[in-house]
Amino acid sequence: MNNAALIGNPNTGKTSLFNALTRSYEYVGNWAGVTVEKKVGHLRGKTGLLTDLPGIYTLHPLSRDEGIAAEYLASESPSVLVNIVDASNLGRNLYLTLQLLEYGKPVIIGLNMMDVAENSGLKVDPGKLADLLGVPVVPLIARTGKGTEEVLQVIEQQSSESAQAPQFTMDYGEVIEQAIQEITRELEADWEDHRPALRWIAMQVLENNPAVISTLPPQTNLLILQKIRTEADVKLAASGLAPSAEAYIRSVRDQRIQNICSEAVDASQKKPHSVTERIDHIVTHPFLGIPLFMVFMYLTFQLTFDWLGNPLSDLLDGFISGPLTSGVENLLTRIGASDFTQALIIDGIIGGVGGVLVFIPQIFIMFLIISFIEDSGYMARITVMMDKLMEIVGLNGKALIPFILGFGCNVPAIMASRSIEQPKERRLTMLLIPLMSCSARLPVYALFAGIFFAESQGLIVFSLYMLGIVLALGLAKLFSLFLFKNERSYFIVELPPYRMPQSITLFRSTWEKGKGFLRKAGTFILGGSVLIWLLTYLGPGGVADNMDDSFLAAIGGLFASVLQPLGFGTWQSGAALITGFMAKEVVVSTMNIIYHVPDMAGLQGQIAASFTGLQAYSFMAFVLLYTPCLATVGVLRKETASWKWTLFAVGYSLALAYLVAFLIYQIGWRLGLGLA
């Protein structure tokens, strides 16, 4: 069976091509040593598998994530490499291509974004490029699927046993070529046939690539390899060619790339200002850029809650509390289910899980907008605009990407922080991501804001998101001053051209984000709802006739007095917050079960009688900031590899939530802002 690998620079349309080449895919665990999910797809026509490698610029990694691709190539044996390159930015993309051509396996070049190149006045000749590189070159527009059938055909041809590795060689000069021969002789005795070409390995050793060196056989004498590399460095420096072998190899490749581009690319008609540049002139304006972003986020919350989300949620609530509940009740009655079973299913499962599922429209709308920001190219601009502000507080602009992803779910957002090169900034970002209001908190906001702030629901929720961001920036400055002192920083980000995302890709991305919420509804929320219902059904004396005598009331009561200064010192609030540690959505499930109501309108009535507007805002702020959910704590432990930092994140967020909620309620109460 074919075993192809897809590799290319970030923002070259690699995901679009992967989706076009595969009918289905799955995450098959994680890459070795990291928590990046390994995505493997089944090629259309069932001709083999396609492994999606992380986007990289070169095989020499800057971050741990980028080392995955180099380690894969050094330790695995793909039958063919599919290298996707951006036709509108060929010079930058070809550096990785030259490294892959020396790998010793068949290579296919997917020349993507031909339409973008043409619109900017560039003419790229695929045939000439194929002649210069000695491998098949297929022109593509991956986001529309144009050219993908040809890629599939070439993959099948190149994966056959008769397919030859590219006859591509580069002469690096006497010093480097001699070093390559010496390293090759040192390694060849223990080398296995299925592994990459020894010349490629020797090049990676001379470039001091830690990801590849770590995969060498254990009996390899690394001291001898280091000695060969050092001797080459000394010779090159003495001759004035370059300070090191790595620098010299880069200069030779850069010269080869210039020669290739001069022959294969006609830039005589290149337009002085592209559409991307004209858009950037507005959206990244020094004074207008950030306000425009804030307006965009405000409109996002208006759309999510007021304009579209609420009507859809009301329809879903009407279905769950009406036809679904009555249908299940009738079915249970017909089969003679006991009162206990009926109460468990109706009040515990449907009441608990259904109370959360009604907020699916808001959550999927939010995910759809986040996917649009990612796929359109706007997210990279946001990081550049915010870089100066982030630098002031000890971060860089790249930290904003995990922060924004945290609006969807904190778990993948923490994983995304691995793209930040510096350990200090990466750890600091991970510690602050739980302050970003994830989709799991949306049901709580939608419930309380819909009751107490119906006329300005979007604005209230927007203020909570901004509260989390402002506190995260303030704590970033505080932590960087006292916990992460004297650590250097740099910021590297690419600005891809603006694109209108394809609907299929957009909805697929939204589904990938949103199905995690549905999965939690069938696991954490379902299990939590059953457990919570049992705790309300039973008490120290057996079956609790009154819920105030239940186990849940006793547990919540332990914290009621502590929460009193925050404005919500009841056992119901305490119980909901405790169960929210499993998953923040369970807060609403718990309240639905505690107040024992048939539909969302009944729950709203009970909460309106138990809270004032000020107490509600204090409660929402506490939910925003307090202890991360169980899944977030787990991934924090895995990513930081430290219980110390994990417990620190749990502790500081709980203390911060208490302090902020205390200030909101006490100051508001003294100012007479009861908002009854």
Image (spheres, grey):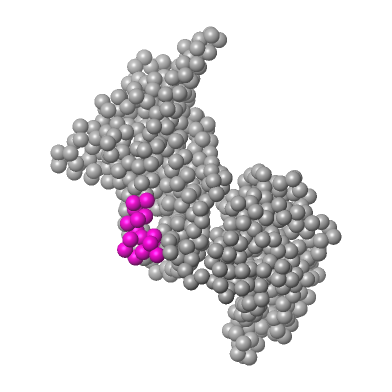
The quarter of the rendered structure image containing the C terminus is top left
Nearer-the-camera pick, 376 or 542: 376
Residue at 58 percent across and 64 percent down: it is: 118
The answer to whether 445 is drawn above or below residue 223 in the figure is above
The answer to whether 663 is drawn above or below residue 642 in the figure is above
Q: Is residue 290 magenta?
A: yes
The answer to whether 200 is drawn above or below residue 159 in the figure is below
Q: Quadrant of residue 361?
A: top left
Q: What x and y, as percent, mark residue 38? A: 62, 51
Residue at 59 percent across and 50 percent down: it is: 37
Nearer-the-camera pick, 34 or 330: 330
Q: Quadrant of residue 625?
A: top left
Q: Is residue 460 magenta?
A: no
Q: What x and y, as percent, mark residue 590? A: 39, 29
Residue furthest toward the bottom?
A: 239
Observer able to see residue 667: yes
Residue at 62 percent across and 55 percent down: it is: 142
Residues rendered magenta in the picture: 281-296
